[in-house]
Amino acid sequence: MTRQKTTFAIVYCCVFAGLLLQGSLRAADSVSTDWPRFRGPAGTGQGAGNLPTKWDENSITWAADLPVHGHSSPIVVGNRIFLTGWTQIDAGVERRVLCIDRKSSKVLWNQVVAVAKGERLHNMNSWATPSCATDGDLVVAFFGPGGLHCLTVDGEPKWSRELGDFPGGWGIGGSPILYGDAIIQNCDAQGDSFLIAVNKKTGKDMWRTPRRSKPRGGWSTPIVIDVNGHDELLLNGEFGLQAYDPNDGTPTWFCKAFNGRGTPAPAIGHGLVYVVNGKSGDVYAVKPGGKGDVTDDRMAWHTERKGGRDLPSPILVGSSLFVVNMAGIATCYDATTGDERWKVRLNGEYSGSPVSAGGLIYVCDENGIVSVVKAGEQFELIARNSVGAAKSEVFRSSPAVSQGQLFLRSTNRLFCIGKLTQ
């Protein structure tokens, strides 16, 4: 392992290994049985309860054909599942928000929120990649050049607004989050980039902070953490991890990355924030709560990480930090020291981020094959499961976990696995 400051890392681990960051969003319960935003209540992929470990296409609860295409992840509140999607019509590309009943798999409503020319995309992206967010009353959806939209959970449009052209040939990917009365949206692009908070009831600006993201843009979703009684908003990006005051958008501290893209969202725990760059480069851990450039004095450890692109976000289970790259190479690191515990090749290619429940990690490849992994000092594969997807289906979204059920979304179908526990 390569460390920036070996002495600091040793002292840090002795002092802070037993501390917990509390891993919580102030605006969302980290042990909620709902899944109200991208990657769950705290935005870190942690699910409550237990999930099935083995299934096949004959034992899944249901599979529903979707009237739209897209890569957004499902979000779940109560018996409602919300998704974004797109359809092509003569006038352009319809951006849609859908609500599906979790028990019957029926579409409850399917609302067109915008019709606009389809922007240029990377061949792995879509016109509906960011996931919805909800507080149980309102649902928010972001489509980049297709605008930011707010609806009631019954599908009634409340307001819509444009946030810019988002130039470049990559498309967008960052999902909105809710924080108090604010909707916070990452608007990184190859042009002018910014982080914005708008009032969820009116759609009007609450604050707007410029971001440095040229020449690539950015596709990460922010998380909010509690640090000694105050909230910090963390957003990965092209140049590193930036922290903000979520109340007014003021930048507070920055840690420089080892390479670009910055697509994966951070993981949190043990008093640390864990970051993967996006492009090949060291995985690193930072102690939050600093001021200014903290690269030299608050980076607890960094470990060499080779092997290609990281699109999936890391996930923390106990003392194990699990990261799988796009080529299916899974690596487990000791979360307190950064030491590499093991590295294995999982079959398949991976775009969506893993989730965890019951101490196990669930990671879905682009063919819909879910590997269930027990992450510890040794690698243990519990099962590999298929939903019997068609060859034309691609799974680039991240799974959702709610009340004993796992939800997987392909380009045009939604799958439910497991029995409802409540």
Image: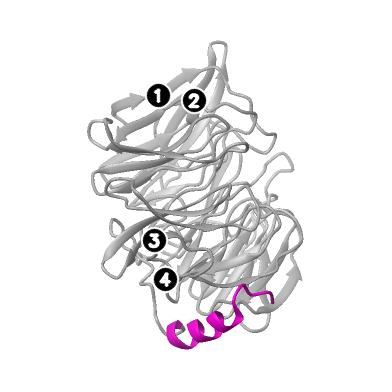
Residue 419 visible in the snapshot = yes
Q: Nearer the viewer, mark 3 or mark 4?
A: 3
Residue type beneath disc 4: Gly
Name the mark on residue 291.
3
Secondary structure character of the magenta stretch overall: helix
Q: Which residue is mark 1?
A: 162
Q: Is residue 191 above or below residue 15?
A: above
Mark 3 falls on what kind of element? loop
> Which of 286 and 123 lies nearest the eye of the viewer?
286
- Sequence order check, earlier mark of 3 and 2: 2
Q: Nearer the viewer, mark 3 or mark 2?
A: 3
Residue 237 in the image, given as x and y percentages of width and height: 54, 48
Name the mark on residue 49.
4
Residue type beneath disc 1: Glu
Q: Which residues are magenta?
A: 1-16
The residue at the point 55 percent across, 85 percent down is 10
